[in-house]
Image (cartoon, rainbow, N blue to C red):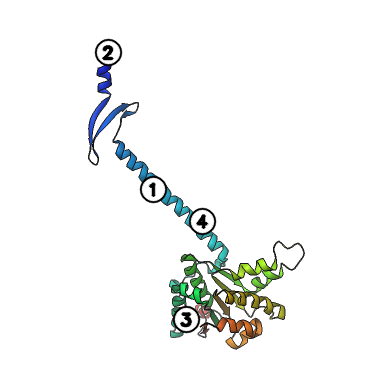
Amino acid sequence: MARSDGRQRYMSALLETCDKHGEFTSLLLAGGWSTCVACGHDAEMAAAAAAQVAWRGQLAARAWDARLGRAAIPERFSDRRLSTYQPTCAEAAQALSVAQRYARSFGAVRQSGMCLIFCGDVGTGKTHLAVGIAHEVLEQGGQAVFTSVIRAVRSVKETFGKGAGRTEAQALRDLVEPDLLILDEVGVQFGSDAEKLILFEIINGRYESRRPTIIISNLALGELEKFLGARAVDRLREGGGKVVIFDWPSYRSRKVA
């Protein structure tokens, strides 16, 4: 009986050879003969590494979604990229070049706080280029926020009433802290002293912390002061701030034609 048990124990283990790890002992288990232990360990390590990569990818995707959500880029413009901007004249090509350099060197731009002012005719691609820059900033890991002047002013005014969910300081901080702020439709608002004061608080707060701002307006440059105030425009122009005049025919009018 002892001899029979010994033979059974002997037949439950075989010496096998793994092409990668050499000789190993294969054991007879319930599901069959065991494979190379070292190969199994390697497979477990590879699976763990793949799971780690997938987990990091999920975190990155969530972070991207959060930045994109906070950016508040309108759905109509969400697909605008610098790579899809098609200049129709030499001046438009120059505007694209300015936007590309600004986005490409945003690290230095963020250190200097250099602003951009896009002003001129409607339908010439001002918003397209500004949103294209915003996407580049987001892809670089920064935070960009897009808002119209009316929404920005309203977000601050809403804190004045009783029972407001946040303070004026918090509303201003949401507009001052992003790495890039895009203020669209300058000139559509009333241009009241109260609006100018709020906009100055935003622009000056960003100026003091060297955070760049992009202004988009259908107005001529000389008319911006009526809606932003001279001090705010001065802040935007200081430190190498660039003005790009969009004075070529509208894309939309070309499509209609």
Please say if 30 is above or below 187: above
Kindly report the distance in space between the C-alpha atoms of the residues bearing marks 4 and 3: 33 Å
- Looking at the figure, which quarter contains the N terminus? top left
Q: Quadrant of residue 153?
A: bottom right
Q: Spatial distance from mark 1 to mark 2, Cα to Cα?
A: 47 Å
* 10 Å crowding of disc 2: few (<14), some (14-19), many (20+): few
**Dot 1 corresponds to which residue?**
49
Q: Give how far apart the Cα atoms at labels 1 and 4 are.
A: 20 Å
Q: Name the side, left or right, on which 200 lies relative to 136.
A: right
The residue at which mark 4 appears reads as 62
Disc with the residue nearer the chain's start (1 vs 3): 1
Q: Position of residue 92 (x, y in %)?
A: 46, 82
Q: Which residue is mark 3?
A: 95
Comes first in the chain, label 2 or label 4:
2
x, y (%) of residue 172?
Answer: 65, 70
* Kind of residue indicated by mark 1: Ala
Indicate the amino acid at tag 2.
Ala
Amino acid on which the number 3 mark rests in the picture: Ala
User: Residue 82 or 99: which is nearer the viewer?
Assistant: 99
Which residue is more in the foreground, 133 or 90?
133
Question: Does residue 82 lie above or below 67 as drawn?
Answer: below
* Residue 224 lies in quadrant: bottom right
**CB of mark 2 within 8 Å of CB of mark 4?**
no
Q: Earlier in the sequence, mark 4 or mark 3?
A: 4
Q: Position of residue 73 (x, y in %)?
A: 56, 67
Mark carried by residue 79 = none
Is label 3 in a helix, a strand or a loop? helix
Q: Which residue is mark 2?
A: 2
